[in-house]
């Protein structure tokens, strides 16, 4: 899989379709994530406030993740912390789930965040999405609280964080 940062010329229609398709199973379970119904304009706005990455296989867009730097205006204190970043718009095309692409694009994005000074990565996901919460636990995240984005969603969100170690540098001669 080829990873790259999103470009100004990114096909936002295709990116939005990927995100919505990846979140469709959650919508079928009654969870109204923003990603289940976001518009192309929403995708562009969310990308503009962060650092986006996409993954491609044979030229096909199959994964995406958007990192967000601290937001001084956030109603969630954790997301205002100067060393805490978060991610969203994390999606893998349905036909490519279960192949490790999500973990790989996530890890590549976290490496970028560390190089930019991030010390803690945060996420929020639906409290009823126990399979996602468990996946994030296996990736080293721990639940640290909750937040409520209603009416934009229809659920209480779980806040999770993962400490990130800065890249070690060698002083060997």
Image (cartoon, grey):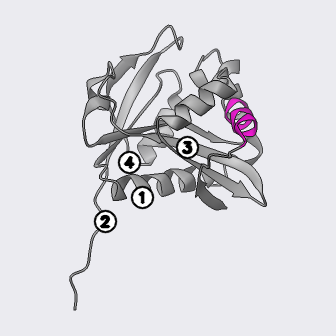
Tell which of 63 and 162 is nearer to you. 63
Q: Secondary structure at mark 3?
A: strand
Q: Label 1 vs label 2: CA separation? A: 8 Å
Q: Secondary structure at mark 4?
A: loop
Q: Label 3 vs label 2: CA separation? A: 21 Å
Label at residue 140: 4
Q: Residue 84: where, in percent of width, then height?
A: 30, 40
Label at residue 32: none
Report if the CB atoms under discs 1 and 2 are less than 8 Å apart. Answer: yes
Q: Residues within 10 Å of mark 3 (few under 14, many from 20)?
A: many
Quarter of the image where one finds residue 168: bottom left
Decide which of tag 4 and tag 2 comes sooner along the chain: 4
Q: Most prominent secondary structure in the magenta stretch?
A: helix
User: Which image quarter holds the N terminus?
Assistant: bottom right
Mark closer to the observer (4, 1): 1
Quarter of the image where one finds residue 31: top right
> Residue pushed farthest top?
151
Q: Secondary structure at mark 1?
A: helix
- Which residue in the structure is indicated by mark 1? 111
- Which residue in the structure is indicated by mark 3? 65
Q: Residue 19: where, in percent of width, then height?
A: 67, 34
Q: Label 4 vs label 1: CA separation? A: 15 Å
Decide which of tag 1 and tag 3 comes sooner along the chain: 3
- Which residue in the structure is indicated by mark 2? 167
- Compared across the picture, whether 89 is left or right of 125 comes to right
- Compared across the picture, whether 127 is left or right of 29 comes to left
Which portion, as a residue range, is magenta? 11-20
């Amino acid at each position: 899989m080829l990873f790259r940062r999103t470009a100004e010329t990114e096909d936002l229609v295709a990116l939005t379709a990927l995100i919505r398709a990846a979140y469709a199973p959650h919508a079928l379970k009654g969870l109204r994530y923003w990603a289940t119904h976001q518009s192309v304009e929403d995708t562009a706005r969310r990308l503009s406030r962060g650092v986006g990455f996409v993954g491609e296989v044979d030229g096909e867009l199959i994964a995406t993740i958007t990192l967000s730097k601290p937001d001084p205006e956030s109603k969630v204190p954790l997301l205002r912390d100067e060393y805490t970043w978060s991610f969203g718009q994390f999606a893998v095309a349905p036909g490519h789930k279960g192949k490790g692409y999500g973990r790989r694009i996530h890890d590549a994005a976290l490496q970028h965040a560390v190089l930019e000074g991030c010390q803690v990565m945060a996420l929020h996901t639906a409290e009823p999405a126990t399979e996602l919460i468990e996946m994030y636990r296996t990736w080293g995240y721990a639940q640290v609280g909750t937040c409520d984005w209603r009416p934009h969603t229809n659920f209480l969100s779980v806040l999770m964080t993962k400490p990130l170690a800065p890249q070690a540098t060698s002083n060997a001669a």
